[in-house]
Image: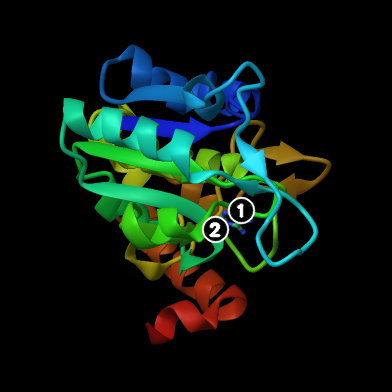
Amino acid sequence: MRIDILTVVPELLESPLGHSIVKRSQNKGFVEIHTHNIRDYAKGSYRQVDDYPFGGEAGMVLMIEPIYTLIERLKSERSYDEIIYMSPDGERFNQKTANHLSTFENLIILCGHYKGVDHRIREHLITKEISIGDYVLSGGELAAAVVIDTIARVVPGVISDETSALSDSFQDNLLAPPVYTRPAEFNGWRVPDVLLSGNPKEIDKWKEEQAFERTKQLRPDLLDE
Ligand code: ADE
């Protein structure tokens, strides 16, 4: 799949997209990520991308022209399944949305900054708005990084042990069971005996029970869904 990210602060995305599984997903050729600086599409020697809001509120608003030019250029090159705007007003992001987005071929993700983008962009160009939670970030970049990381790990083939992404918390609306590694005993704190038993059937049963119990205790709302 291909993801085009539109931002006025591309630097904010460099590290989150350049390491770990997101990097591996690109190196292996499963995910292609292109970051575009909106400023490159702005006019004039100042390459202005933002302006004061009509109506006299505080803060600056990202202008429609450079974003329109960039989106139209991308759309002339390929068709996009969704043109997403990262916003606290958007639909709340969760694992189900990530799984669904991971099945698409081409996505555009627009990151707002300052007070947001000229509303005409949201009315006429955006097909979906996503929020990562009820709080306001300084821009959509970190939210976009969260969305892309979550998508990349469920793209088939990205995680070599295929069952690993499927056993993440929230797949099947259950939290993941606890995990342990060596040493089997530290400071008198022992790993549960069943995990050392070598009995795969018993181990699977224990994991299922733990996932259910932890979900019941920590996130009972997930069991109602
Ligand atoms: N931009 C600013 N805050 C955001 C949020 N909570 N989710 C997505 N994009 C945002």
Could you tell me residue 3's position as x and y percent? 34, 32
> Which residue position holds label 2?
87
In this view, 62 is above or below 74: below
- Residue shown at the point (65%, 29%) measured from the top left: 12
- Residue shown at the point (23%, 36%) measured from the top left: 106
Q: Nearer the viewer, residue 219 or 63?
A: 63
> What's the mark number on residue 116?
1
- Residue at the outermost right position: 187
In-image side of 154 versus 36 (left or right) = left
Whether label 2 lies within 8 Å of ligand 1 gets the answer yes
The three-letter amino acid code for the residue at tag 2 is Ser
Q: Earlier in the sequence, mark 1 or mark 2?
A: 2
Describe the element under mark 2 as helix, strand or loop. strand
The three-letter amino acid code for the residue at tag 1 is Gly
In front: label 1 or label 2: 1
Q: Nearer the viewer, residue 92 or 21?
A: 92
- The image quadrant where one finds ligand 1 is bottom right
Q: Quadrant of the N terminus?
A: top left
Describe the element under mark 1 as helix, strand or loop. loop
- Pointer 1 with pointer 2, Cβ within 8 A: yes
Could you tell me residue 52's position as x and y percent? 71, 50
Q: Nearer the viewer, residue 8 or 43?
A: 43
In this view, 14 is above or below 213: above
In this view, 164 is above or below 172: above
The answer to which quarter of the image holds residue 133 is: bottom right
- Residue shown at the point (72%, 48%) measured from the top left: 138
- Residue shown at the point (36%, 52%) measured from the top left: 98
**Mark 1 → mark 2, Cα distance in angstroms:** 8 Å
Q: Quadrant of the C terminus?
A: bottom left
Badge 1 local density, few (<14 within 10 Å), some, or many (20+)? some
Q: Is residue 167 visible?
A: no
